[in-house]
Image: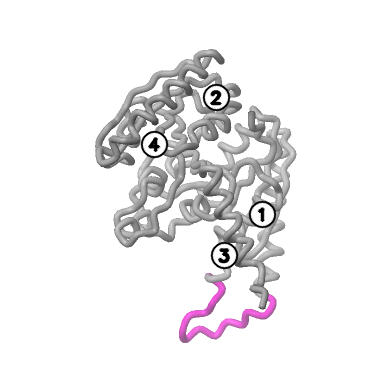
Amino acid sequence: MNIIKNILVPVNFSKSSKNAVTTAIAMCKRHDAELHLMHIIDTEQLIPTAGMNIPLTGLEDKMIYELNQKLKQYAQEISSAEGLVCHTYCDSGFVPYAISEKAKALNADLIVIGGRNKNSVSNLLPGNTAYNVVKQALQPVLIVPATSKSISFKNILMPVRPILNIAEKYEFIKPIIKKNGASVFVLGAANEYQPQKYQAMKNVISKTVEDMGKHNVPAEHEYYFRSKLADAVIEKSKKLRADLIVITTTFNRSIKQFFVGSYTRKIANNNSTPVLCIKPYNMVLEDYDMKMQLKTPALS
């Protein structure tokens, strides 16, 4: 069983990030974990536009120092009030990459990040920070809605598609289920254009639900066999009044997906429920290998 001991939370002092911190604090208490707060100065915001005459010499260092002091004070307030071990980090760079690198350096078990308002126009674009962190990070990412605070997860919705990582996903959320005394609803979601995968998915779900029963986890399941899988998940979460959705993250880089939006993006950006995004293990390895190749100079 995976153990959650280090939780990283990107902080920009907005209402959204404070909601994420509130969720992370509650999780740290339940899991006896340490809290890591990080603020990143987006270097793209430091580039002067045409007509501006701003000297950048020393500006970034000054901003990092001032924000680091603010972050340390915030962490001290949390430690005093909540009795948690709380670490702080302040850096600059491309935000999603900086978060991903810090999570890897800390060996973080989970990243908790605030989402944007689901009605925001920015959520229609691929540049959404939370979504880009999900794409970049190797660790599971919990996206907390901007509109609500989430303290506990009693009612968990776990959509399952014909992707062979159901066991991985269930293994990661086992401690979350246990610490929250949660019930689980497993939604088998198969695309109507992939009938050959339906029976295999059904068999795996049956075994997973059976295992939950052996561990005294209240569990129900049903199957959805049509198109628009993301819409089905969002609709089901509303009916169940779920307080956590656990999804497998996959990314389709086609032009159609760029404009219409992937399964992951639709659920993460159009839901008022926290969404825990977990990459399949093979995708994590592929991402890691690709990052290592980018860092390693080619040999002549």
Question: Which label belongs to residue 127?
Answer: none
Q: What is the magenta range? A: 45-58
Q: Earlier in the sequence, mark 2 or mark 1?
A: 1
Query: Which residue is at a point 39% across and 49% down the rendered structure image?
Result: 265
The Cα atoms of the two marked residues, 2 and 3, are separated by 34 Å
The Cα atoms of the two marked residues, 2 and 4, are separated by 20 Å
In this rendering, the answer to whether 186 lies above or below 65 is: above
Query: Which residue is at a point 48% across and 80% down the rendered structure image?
Result: 49
Image quadrant holding the C terminus, namely bottom right
Q: Which of marks 4 and 1 is nearer the N terminus?
A: 1
Q: Tag 1, which secondary structure?
A: helix
Could you say which is closer to the camera, residue 222 or residue 47? 222
Question: Which label belongs to residue 161?
Answer: 4
Q: Mark 2 points at which residue?
A: 177
What is the crowding at mark 3: few (fewer than 14 residues within 10 Å), some, or many (at least 20)?
some
Question: Which label belongs to residue 102?
Answer: 1
